Amino acid sequence: MHQRDSDLNQQGSLAPLGIGLAMLSLTSVLAILASGSLYLTERRLTTVAESTAISVLIDAKGDLSQTLTPLARRWLDQAPLNGLHQVELVEASSADLRTVRVRLCSSSKPIFANYMFSEIGRVCSEALARRGR
């Protein structure tokens, strides 16, 4: 049986392809995990913002013309901030004296310390709580 020269040149050509596919797969998995972590941080921050807006609405006792920031800060000092880092109160206001708007921002720490998507980012969330009639 005689081998052709073209068959001899093809030996080993699958190794770089396999290595490239493995690197691409690993990068995809890590990117999906990092984006999932970012999504969970945003959901946690939204939950805290909603709780803060409701708390401010209750603590204001119907008087939304007052400064709402101290009420929001008081709630944030007592609220459990599990998984959130450096939570910052950006806004606590009421434009129409019926709706409380709370805006919070937090730093998002990466789940992998030595990874190409490992920059510390900032995640912001907003919540509204409206007073009934």
Image: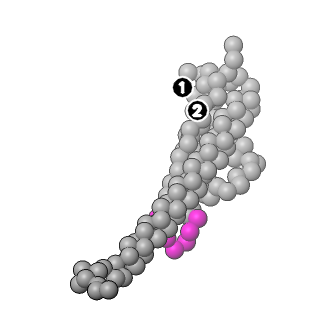
Q: Please check the rendered image and state whether residue 115 is part of the magenta-colored stretch, yes or no.
A: yes
Residue highlighted by disc 1? 95
Q: Dot 1: few (<14), some (14–19), or many (≥20) neighbours within 10 Å?
A: few
Q: Which residue is rendered at x = 52% and y = 57% of the image?
A: 32
Q: Is the magenta stretch mostly helix, strand or loop?
A: loop
> Residue 29 vs residue 50: left or right?
left
Q: Residue furthest top?
A: 133
Q: Which mark is residue 101?
A: 2
Q: Is residue 1 visible?
A: yes
Q: Distance between the residues labelled 2 and 1?
A: 8 Å
Magenta residues, start to end: 111-117
Q: Residue furthest left?
A: 5
Which three-letter amino acid code belongs to the residue tagged 2? Arg
Disc 2 versus disc 1: nearer the observer: 2
Q: What element carries label 1?
A: loop
Q: Is mark 2 on a helix, strand or loop?
A: strand
Q: Dot 2: few (<14), some (14–19), or many (≥20) neighbours within 10 Å?
A: many
Percent x, y of residue 51: 70, 38
Q: Which residue is rendered at x = 38% and y = 76% of the image?
A: 14
Q: Which residue is rendered at x = 62% and y = 42% of the image?
A: 46
- Towards the viewer: 7 or 63: 7
Relative to 67, residue 32 above or below = below
**Quarter occupied by residue 34:** bottom right
Percent x, y of residue 2: 28, 86
Q: Which residue is rendered at x = 60% and y = 31% of the image?
A: 128
Which three-letter amino acid code belongs to the residue tagged 1? Ala
